[in-house]
Image (cartoon, helix red, strand yellow):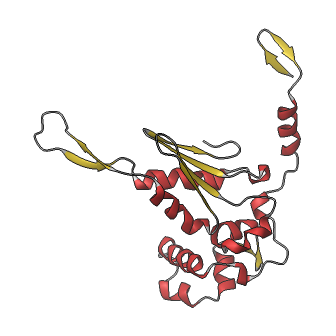
Amino acid sequence: YARAGESLTHLGLDKLDELRGQVGAADWSAHQVAGATLADLDATALAKARESFAKKYANRFTSAEVAAWPETTFLDRAQLTQAGHITRATLLLVGKAESAYRLSPHPAQLTWKLEGTERAYQHFKPPFLLTTTELYQKIRNVPLSILPDNQLVPVVVDKYDRKIVLEALHNCIAHQDYARNGRVLVTEQPDRLIFESEGAIF
């Protein structure tokens, strides 16, 4: 039941569907993709993933050791594959754009949308490991001159902090409810950025 003002009423259909979906719900991103092979993965994204992995685990592995691993070993250790099998998450993060059809009906896209006096939009396909940076570069991050109190010299700062924008975007990707087949949407308005992702997100 749900509360409507001072009385109880039946739950709406959307709430009932949400509750039903929680019972034994499988992780959409962990599902193995039938027919997907290493040929579906983007070489540049894999190199970037390997480089990032080596930096993160520098206390456990040398960069030369990580570079010497075969692709299958690296992908399993980075938890991008399961026992050599490519998952939906693998295709989203390091897959080729032309291999996104394997995720159908999911659109597998990030979308940047400009609103205001000018209007524009652009979709970005996998590999999300690289295209998040491309999306960030579309944002009009103009330098602003701020004059702090009691100071003669202005301080020049970017309108948006790169690290914060990318963290918000990465959170949208990581916490999206992919079962809803939606896009991550970044809307740029004259005075703000709005990040939207399907499902619950902090």
- Along the horizontal axis of the image, is 84 left or right of 131? right
Above or below, 3 against 22 in this view is above
- Along the horizontal axis of the image, is 144 left or right of 16? left
Judging depth in this view, the residue of 49 and 119 nearest the camera is 119
At horizontal 64% and vertical 51% (from top left) the residue drawn is 184
Q: Name the outermost residue toward the top.
A: 6
- Along the horizontal axis of the image, is 11 left or right of 182? right
Judging depth in this view, the residue of 169 and 193 nearest the camera is 193
- Along the horizontal axis of the image, is 143 left or right of 31? left
At horizontal 68% and vertical 51% (from top left) the residue drawn is 176
Above or below, 189 against 135 in this view is above
Locate the N terminus by quadrant. top right
Q: Residue 181: horizontal and vertical position, in percent? A: 77, 52
At horizontal 36% and vertical 47% (from top left) the residue drawn is 159
Q: Residue 10 is drawn in which quadrant?
A: top right
Q: Residue 37 is drawn in which quadrant?
A: bottom right
